[in-house]
Amino acid sequence: MFDTLSDRLSSVFKKFSGQKRLTEENVQEGLREVRLALLEADVNFKVVKQFIDRVRDKCLGQDVLKGLNPAQQVIKIVNDEMIELLGGETTGLDLRGQQPYVIMMVGLQGSGKTTSTGKLANHLRKSKMRPYLAPADVYRPAAIDQLKTLAAQLDLPVYDSTVQMNPVDIARNAVAAAREQQCNVVILDTAGRLHIDETLMQELVAIKEAVAPQEILFVADAMTGQDAVTVADAFNNALDITGVVLTKMDGDARGGAALSIKTVTGKSVKFVGMGEKLSDLEVFHPDRIASRILG
Ligand code: GDP
């Protein structure tokens, strides 16, 4: 998904390779192109500004990187800042305290929430956890059936929710049922809407208060670019999310969401969805993504 950005950046770096040293002039000119490349990749403009300022300061105040030529110096600085932009260290799930742990999945309809719930269960089972699935999206009847089907495919227990039930009761009862069945992690699929609305947020806050989840993962569709970042910010303000699952990274999204979410919300991307299959979930490694972008 970062192909265009990657191509643009490598042509900027090529220009530096003919230079003997970094001057204010060639740095300014190079960074103007980096800035355009990031904006074209749909990165939030405030994020771009911060990024460029930091890279410029480092390039011009440089005496640490002796032994590297100008192109290598710029690449090293951009790489380090890109890793920071993407969230720094890899942040996995932080599951501590009383079991069963609860992971609450939130996000807009169509973002890939239900699919990611199944993928995450599959991922956790591989690391010897015993997941229990809980469908709490009572407004989209197909969502309950979809998660029950995924549970059957994975051969995992699932709470027998119906559309008549109250989502807060589903959450509470599912945690109790998981405990009885000796499952140690409940993954709760909540309702989404096409747009953020107050009723949805209140319901999600009520679920959060009822079951005190260790993780609240906001599921964002990478294809929606800056909208994903705005919506992530709104969910974070209401729910204090603990991380993000960025779906549809296998598509031709320009990368803006991946590059903006951490700076805008302060919350890290923890997983990425790379396809529709249950195995298409990967842990998000900022350093690997940065080196993919920088070639
Ligand atoms: P929900 O309404 O948020 O629960 O969304 P769903 O889980 O039903 O997903 C909506 C659509 O996106 C479905 O067709 C999924 O197969 C698809 N989808 C989800 N995650 C990914 C992904 O990582 N890559 C691709 N290509 N499609 C995905």
Image (spheres, rainbow, N blue to C red):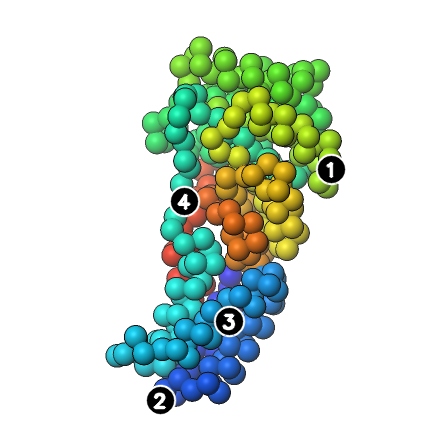
Residue behind mark 2: 20
Label 2, secondary structure: give it.
Answer: loop
The answer for how far apart the CA atoms under marks 4 and 3 are is 26 Å
The answer for how far apart the CA atoms under marks 1 and 2 are is 56 Å
Mark 2 in CB contact with mark 4 (< 8 angstroms): no
Q: Quadrant of ligand 1?
A: top right
**10 Å neighbourhood of mark 2: few (<14), some, or many (≥20)?**
few
- Where residue 92 appears, x then y in whole percent? 40, 41
**10 Å neighbourhood of mark 4: few (<14), some, or many (≥20)?**
some
The answer for how far apart the CA atoms under marks 3 and 1 are is 36 Å
Q: Earlier in the sequence, mark 3 or mark 1?
A: 3
Q: Earlier in the sequence, mark 1 or mark 2?
A: 2
Residue 91: mark: 4
Residue behind mark 1: 197
- Where residue 230 appears, x then y in whole percent? 65, 50
Cβ of disc 3 within 8 Å of ligand 1?
Answer: no
- Where residue 71 appears, x then y in whole percent? 38, 79
